[in-house]
Amino acid sequence: VKVIYRRKEEDMPATKSEYEDALKEGVQFYFESAPLAYSGKDGEVTGVRVKTPHGEVVHDADVVLVAIGSKPARRIVSTTAGIEVDSKGYVITREKPYGMTTLRGVFAGGDVVHQPATVVKAMKEAKKVADGMAAYVDAKKLLEV
């Protein structure tokens, strides 16, 4: 797992223990890295191109989760072919696998899909999206055998 974060480490909203636990789990953090574009092949995501203080870098990826805030970000959906939105600008997702956008392999959840609500709803939805992602990854693994 890679976390690509626009700001510096000290700007992260995560607690120190959350960050340290993630590092122990093998999560790699890339700070001051602004996503520029997603790459793909045959309708599936293969990477993320980011701008860093040292130039542009491409990170390999087979799944991308985008945390973009509490309202739909037009810039992301307008610059990424295949992610459709409804008439109010909210990202359209599937029921199976739960949370997958109209771009295969790209999942969305939370306020970008639903209007802002309670933390309880957000947590419930996040778990459902995580389950959908796991089902998608498991299905891909089965088909590759």
Image (cartoon, rainbow, N blue to C red):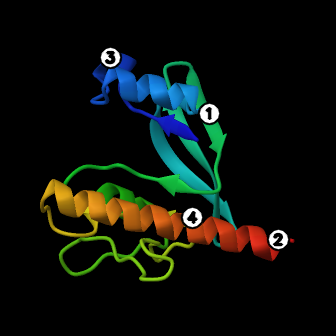
Q: Mark 1 or mark 3, which has the lower sequence index?
A: 3
Q: CA distance from mark 4 to mark 2?
A: 15 Å
Q: Helix, strand, or loop for circle 4?
A: helix
Distance from disc 1 to disc 2, alpha carbons, whole Å, reads 28 Å
The disc labelled 4 sits on which kind of residue?
A: Ala
> CB under 8 Å between callouts 2 and 3?
no
- Residue 48 pos. (x, y %): 57, 47
> Which residue corresponds to the image point at 64% horizontal and 39% vertical from the top-left?
58
Give x and y (percent) for residue 111: 22, 61
The residue positioned 21% from the left and 81% from the top of the image is 87
Local secondary structure at mark 3:
helix
Kind of residue at disc 1: Val
Q: Is residue 36 left or right of residue 114?
A: right
- Can residue 31 be seen in the rendering of this structure? no
Give the number of the disc on residue 144: 2
How far apart are the two marked residues, 1 and 3, measured between alpha carbons? Answer: 22 Å
Of the two numbered discs 4 and 3 on the same chain, state the one appearing first in sequence.
3
Comparing labels 4 and 1, the label whose residue is closer to the camera: 4
Q: Which residue is mark 3?
A: 10
Mark 1, residue position: 57
Furthest toward the left, the residue is 117
